[in-house]
Amino acid sequence: MAWADSRSYCQSIGSDLATWGMRNASIRNWIIENLLRPRPDNGYWIGLSDIEQEGVWKYVDGVAITTTNTDFAVGEPSSGLPGEDCAHLWWERNYQMNDNLCSEYMLAICERIPN
Ligand SMILES: [Ca+2]
Ligand SMILES: [Ca+2]
């Protein structure tokens, strides 16, 4: 699904695209090692984008990234093409993050934070 459709799907099941679990490296690595599987041609959308303002990366729960590039693969986010505004885990790069066209077809990581 495209990024927005992925987000809608997550919301339809009472969750949202992953945020909290993506910000914590050890939790993220646990998710990668235990819940994801290699899927050629597909990455995993997460709840991070620079849709609102180009170059300003913000999670869908409102938390902005303050240190650039920390969790992105080398050379990313590239904004290589107009519309590379949505972040995904890039399996070809050991599941580091990449910005890509929001219209790309990817899997999604939904996350629900217990109250
Ligand atoms: Ca962008
Ligand atoms: Ca990119």
Image: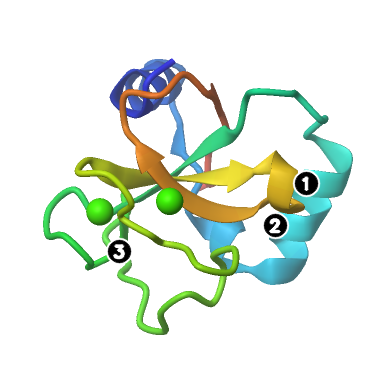
Q: In the rendered view, would you say 30 is above or below 45? A: below
- According to the picture, the residue beneath numbered tag 2 turns out to be 28
Q: Residue at x 38, y 16 (%)?
A: 12
Secondary structure category for the residue under label 1: helix
What is the distance, in whole Å, between disc 2 and disc 3 at their CAs? 18 Å
User: Callout 2, which amino acid?
Assistant: Arg
Q: Residue at x 78, y 46 (%)?
A: 32
Quadrant that contains the N terminus: top left
User: Callout 3, which amino acid?
Assistant: Trp
Is residue 59 rendered to the left or right of residue 88?
A: left
Mark 1 close to ligand 2, CB under 8 Å:
no
If you read the primary sequence from the N terminus, does the residue marked by circle 2 or circle 3 appear first? 2
Q: Residue at x 63, y 44 (%)?
A: 90
Q: Where does the image place residue 9, in percent across and percent down from the top left?
A: 41, 17
Secondary structure category for the residue under label 3: loop
Tell me if mark 2 has few (under 14), some (14-19) or many (20+) residues whose alpha carbon lies within 10 angstroms of its own.
some
- According to the picture, the residue beneath numbered tag 3 turns out to be 57
What is the distance, in whole Å, between disc 1 and disc 3 at their CAs? 21 Å
Closer to the camera, 89 or 15?
Answer: 89
Marks 1/2 in contact by CB < 8 Å: the verdict is: yes
Which quarter of the figure has residue 97?
Answer: bottom right
